[in-house]
Amino acid sequence: MGTKGRGRLASFILDDHRYVLLGTSTVAGVGMLLSSQPRPALSFLARAFTVELVMYYLLAAWLVVSAVALVFKLTHWKTYDASAPFTKPAVARALRYASYVVWAMTFVLVVDRVVMGVASAWQVAVAAESRPADDMLQSMCYILWNGRGTFATGLATTIELAVFGTIIAFFLALLLVFCRIQTIDRPDNDFVRFLKVVGSGFAKVYSTVVRGTPMMVQAMIIYFGVFGILRTTDLTTTQINGIWSAFVAGLVTITLNSTAYMMEVLRGGIESVDPGQAEAARSLGLSQWQAMSKVVFPQGVKYAIPGLSNELIINIKDSSVLSVIGTFDLMFANTTVSGIYYKQFETSLIVTVMYLILTLAASWLLGRFAHHFDVTPEPFGSTSDQTILGEE
């Protein structure tokens, strides 16, 4: 190994031991904090007090070593790299192996205190005749168990709204984006030119209005507006509710709202394709429509996949505003259950975990879908705050 190679190895070992000491000290602190907590009823460490005591002191020893390294760093600021014993390859290797032990012990404590704590609280809550008032975790488990039917209905509705709304919006966005990017071509007759101008203008106005107004307001206008129109007919209120339910209105709202954002994401993907591709297609005799549909659009969709897939995650979260019109989603279930037990905080925590699980699962599935097309998935976030390429 040359001089440069040895220098790089020494620099890596130095940086590695710093990260090991700093990061694992936090883990050790969490482990000690968990060890000081009361043991749950199902704790498997309750019968191994000596083992847990040894684990506690080993975690404390790691914190002492880290503190010594920090003090040494402060007192030998300029000569630390050369004089500190922690930078020696053998010591750095020992610290790395010791950090694995610290992580393993903390993991055992997490399982014993957190996982078994939840299991203990669940066991008590399921068997309880009334809601436990002294323990918040047991109270949450009791609310979740006894309100499971309401939560399940809200969860299913949220998934249906997000999935079907996103799928329908995708096909509507395809139609609108073709209208949005149309330009006047020389072979077009007057009627075709008129259709292109009207279609492009409608798509621009639609995108501006929908993206510039809150979904909650849109939901109220759509639901009560259509309901008011149907009231002018001979239909009774019961018949109208059978036709125009809160679920249908919520699905229409999500679809129309998501269409505007997906249209702009598609347009950004299409306009990110090299213009020379369309020019080359036209030079080969393809019409404007053929060049777009056979050459530009397939490439543009690939660029737009991350933003399009991210819209599903946005719809899972944004569907919560539909409870304002009575759609029985997770947010409506939250309001219903919290009204029964007068525990808004605990019920909101339960629903928060449900939303988090949904978004994490959707993110993982969409990530697999994106990797299938060799594109990088986007992190959590709304497509509404992303810059659209080529936007006027």
Image: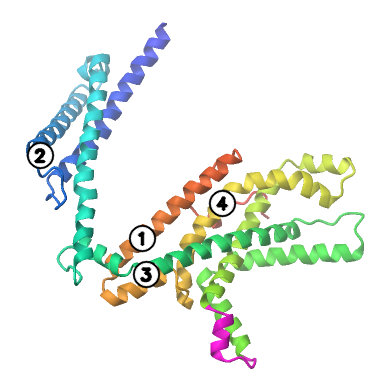
Tell me the CA gap for discs 3 and 4: 30 Å
Instruction: Return the residue at label 2.
Output: 48
The reply to whether dot 4 and dot 1 touch (C-beta < 8 Å) is: no
Which amino acid lies under the numbered mark 2 shown in the image of this protein? Answer: Ala
Which amino acid lies under the numbered mark 1 shown in the image of this protein? Answer: Thr
Q: For residue 25, which quarter of the picture?
A: top left
Residue 197 sits above or below residue 14 on the image: below
Tell me the CA gap for discs 2 and 3: 40 Å
Instruction: Return the residue at label 4.
Output: 309
Does dot 3 land on a helix, a strand or a loop?
helix
Magenta includes 137? no
> Closer to the N terminus: mark 3 or mark 4?
3
Residue 43 position within the rendered picture, expressed as x and y whole percent measured from the top left: 15, 47
Which amino acid lies under the numbered mark 3 shown in the image of this protein? Answer: Gly
Tell me the CA gap for discs 2 and 1: 35 Å
Does dot 2 land on a helix, a strand or a loop?
loop
- Looking at the rendering, in which quadrant would you find the N terminus? top left
Residue sitting at 23 percent across and 64 percent down?
A: 126
Instruction: Return the residue at label 1.
Output: 352
Please identify the residue farthest to the top as the structure is shown. Answer: 2
Does dot 4 land on a helix, a strand or a loop?
helix
Residue 347 position within the rendered picture, expressed as x and y whole percent measured from the top left: 30, 67
- As rendered, which of 18 and 298 lies closer to the eye? 298
Q: For residue 60, which quarter of the picture?
A: top left
The stretch in magenta equals 232-245
- As rendered, which of 389 and 64 lies closer to the eye? 64
Residue 222 sits above or below residue 308 on the image: below
Does 300 sit left or right of 213 as displayed? right
Instruction: Return the residue at label 3.
Output: 149
Magenta includes 233? yes
The reply to whether dot 3 and dot 4 touch (C-beta < 8 Å) is: no
